[in-house]
Amino acid sequence: MSSTTSASSANPGRSALAAYRALPARAGWGYLIATSLGRLPLSMMPLAILTLATASTGSIALAGVAAAAAAVGEAIGAPTGGALSDRFGQRPVLLTGVVLNVGFAVAFVATIADAPDLLIVALAGATGLSLPQVGPLSRVRWMAMSGDDLSAAFAFEGVTDEVV
């Protein structure tokens, strides 16, 4: 299929708009909203760590290292989370990731003012490592539940990723 194929190519008598309108019926508004909001930490975590660490420690260098540790943690955690999801399913991996991520983020915020530099970097890295990969896991779910609306579902995913 070419990249210009419309969302309704699987069903030529149906408009692309109808395929997009079908998504809430397939997945539910709760799912659409949750997966949209669930992507926010992925883009905001390194920026938040950089900003908080700079303001709390006064060191741009330390803040940069902490933000880089969070980004490296995300890069390691994403395929690890995918492999764990393949083995144990999405729900336990996402729920565990949320609990760990919130715990590490709270620990980072609570200790940033007085913590040694190494602890700041380690907590930032652990925060990135434990970040739940909502977007990729959502795309996998769409493959199972979207039927003829897969192109529209992936278009929704792409738009959501860009907006977030």
Image (spheres, rainbow, N blue to C red):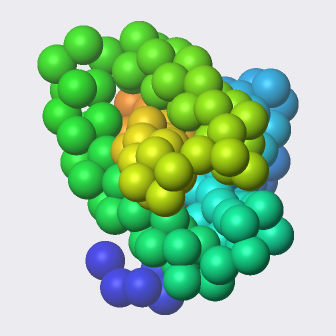
Residue 90: name its quadrant. top left
Picture residue at 51% right of the left edge, 51% below the top: 116
23 or 105: which is nearer to us?
Answer: 105
**How far across and down, in percent of the image, does residue 151 sit?**
51, 60
Residue 103 percent location from the top left of the image: 60, 25
Looking at the image, is 5 positioned above or below residue 161? below
Asked if residue 41 lies left or right of residue 129, the reply is right
Q: Is residue 76 visible?
A: yes
Q: Say above or below: 122 vs 31.
A: below
Say which of 44 and 39 sits in front.
44
Q: As rendered, which of 134 and 98 lies closer to the eye?
A: 98
Residue 111 in the image: x percent, y percent? 67, 39
Q: Residue at x 50, y 65 (%)?
A: 66
For residue 77, side relative to residue 121 (left or right)? left
Coordinates of residue 81 in the picture (x, y in percent): 30, 36
Quadrant in the picture for the N terminus: bottom left
Residue in front for this viewpoint, 84 or 52:
52
Residue drawn at (68%, 46%), measured in percent from left and top? 114
Q: Quadrant of residue 44?
A: bottom right
Say whether residue 27 is left or right of residue 61: right
Asked whether residue 13 appears in the rendered view, the answer is: no
Q: How many marks?
A: 0
Residue sitting at x 65%, y 78% = 59
Q: Quadrant of the C terminus?
A: bottom right
